[in-house]
Amino acid sequence: MNNDPTKLGTVEDVNGASISVVLDDDAVKGLAFVDGRAYRIGQLGSFVRIPIGYVSLFGIVSQVGASAIPERIAAETDKIGRRWMSVQLVGEGSHKGEFRRGLSQYPTVGDAVHLVTEEDLTHIYGRPDSPKFLKIGYLASAESIPALVDIDSLITRHSAIVGSTGTGKSTTVAGLLSAISDPGRFKSARVIVFDIHGEYAQAMRDQSNVFKINPDKKRSELPLYVPYWALNFEELLSVTFGDSVGESERGGIIERITEKKLEALKNKPRKGVSESTLNVDTPVPFSLHQLWYELHLLIISTHLQTGNQSLSTVAFETDQNGTPVDIGDAMQVRPPKCKPQNTSAGAQPKVYLSQSNLNIRRPLEGLAYKLRDSRFDFLFRPGDWLPDKNGIPAKDLDELLRNWLECKKPVTILDLSGVPREILNILIGALLRIIYDSLFWARNIPEGGRERPLLLVLEEAHAYLGKEDTGPAAQAVRRIVKEGRKYGMGAMIISQRPVEIDTTILSQCGTFFAMRLANEQDRAHVTSAVSDNLEGLFKMLPILRTGEAIIVGEAVHIPVRAMISPPPKNRRPDSQDPVVYDDAGPGGWNREREPSDYEEVIELWRKQTSISPHIITFNEEEQ
């Protein structure tokens, strides 16, 4: 007869970190009472304890079952069959209640196995009053015990939040960001959110500054500017001339951009760079509009040739007095009016098309289109960061970084919902590289990341971090997850399709928040990326509730199944499911049909904004 109500059974088999446990006869009834509390026995995801001297090993139940035995033997021995559990060992605790991951020893056959009480769980999961831990919810199996994460490991060792659509992923992110940016605890927090769909502005409105291509002043949004001259050559080439430019043309473009940067540097010297150290990637302002104009004169305009002179004189269209009709305007991207080609025998002077060896006529015409397209103004006309013809802008990059990294609020949201899709990948890569390079070179001063780490939150990561993706965004993220920890940069990868994300990137994430995943390939991808031997635990992913997550990795003492506490309803991301039938009142499809104004629909479409001037914003509601 077993007098210890916590004893479940004994170890029967040990295979590395996996053990098999045979349940005692007294334990098979499925319910145990300890200190007045009832505990379910054999629940998947529950914990067990194996005392070995002064140390207790802890494990997670990953499988339960009952072996079939012949009826004749059962009649003589066990009328209810042989009950067993599979357990994955995850750590050990001392007699003082301290818990640590990993094992210093293994159990042997016959060792007693006990259920874990709430008192044991409190020692395992840490103290909620410790400033190092963030409370993000509570244990799914014990609502009285908070779910805690170690903020040091969460930020610097990278993390991933994965889950199918509708599992509460965005709400979980909003809750985490609210806890991380709590001004009462973390006065110097720095977080940058790459918000692809514009979901987080409302959720984080009290703790964030929102930068957007088409900002709404009523919502206190700020314009998002990314100066083209802060991009390196490969990034700039992709968004200007395109990647199809040949090698010889690339060399010519490099030479001319470098020349324009040298000219601008002579006009206004800048600290940290000289004419001898400058190269095409040095973030020195120059006028792209002036470069376009000069290349247009060289390649697209017609030229005069008189006698033995070379084709160096542009054949401007002139009036009766010989004055050019229109020489064009670089800043307005207006090409000059030139005379048509005329190479007939009697023509004097003869008018020739350009004979430049730089074969970029079509890419140059494409650049002119982009320079005129208002959708690209955030890049090619970046406000105070737009250089004049001499390559001198009103502000330098230090002011831009100060806006992103040193705002009065701890969270910076880069709302990329208005960015043209064809350059989204390039832009994300450029932004990440700019941030990485600045913090890398500032690693030994207070503005760097070693003294004040930075968290980069990457929403919808599967859209630009694919397995075979070699774009700028994927390259930048791979660099950050591999090297960023040393310089105080952490990444939080968020995705509904983890199977589409590069395994190299996922495997660098030290902590996983795995929410409900219905797709088998997604589950397998996450399981393969997690270092812990917890395949059995991840089999629970298809049945998790909305807002529930399995948290594993370095930010938690032990893998935990937790309910994440959502923020208040008026502080949740703009990603809630639309209501088809509203039980609470007339809404969705059960509302009365009202007069429609599709004229306003077209107005918003043309303005490229979803914010109607007729709807009261949350700032106005609070005033």
Image (cartoon, rainbow, N blue to C red):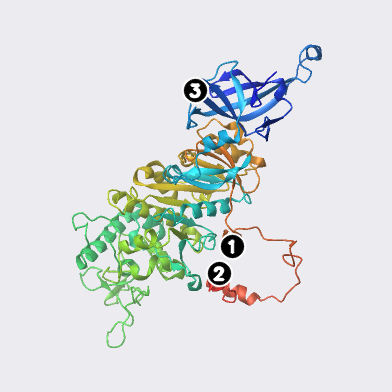
Mark 2 residue type: Phe
Neighbourhood count class around disc 3 (C-alpha, 10 Å): few under 14, some 14–19, many 20 upward: few
Instruction: Left or right? Give the position of 197 relative to 299.
Output: right
First in sequence, mark 2 or 3: give its number: 3
Label 2 to label 3: alpha-carbon separation: 58 Å
Foreground of the two, 488 or 374: 488
Indicate the quadrant containing the N terminus: top left, top right, bottom left or bottom right: top right
Answer whether residue 331 is visible to the viewer in this image: yes
- Residue extending furthest toward the bottom: 320
x then y, percent, for residue 388: 30, 71
x then y, percent, for residue 562: 59, 43
Neighbourhood count class around disc 1 (C-alpha, 10 Å): few under 14, some 14–19, many 20 upward: few
Label 3 to label 1: alpha-carbon separation: 50 Å
Residue lying at 23% horizontally and 68% vertically, measured from the top left = 310
Mark 1 residue type: Asn
Asked which quadrant contains residue 516, the reply is: top right
x then y, percent, for residue 3: 67, 21
479 in relation to 76, above or below: below
Mark 3 residue type: Tyr
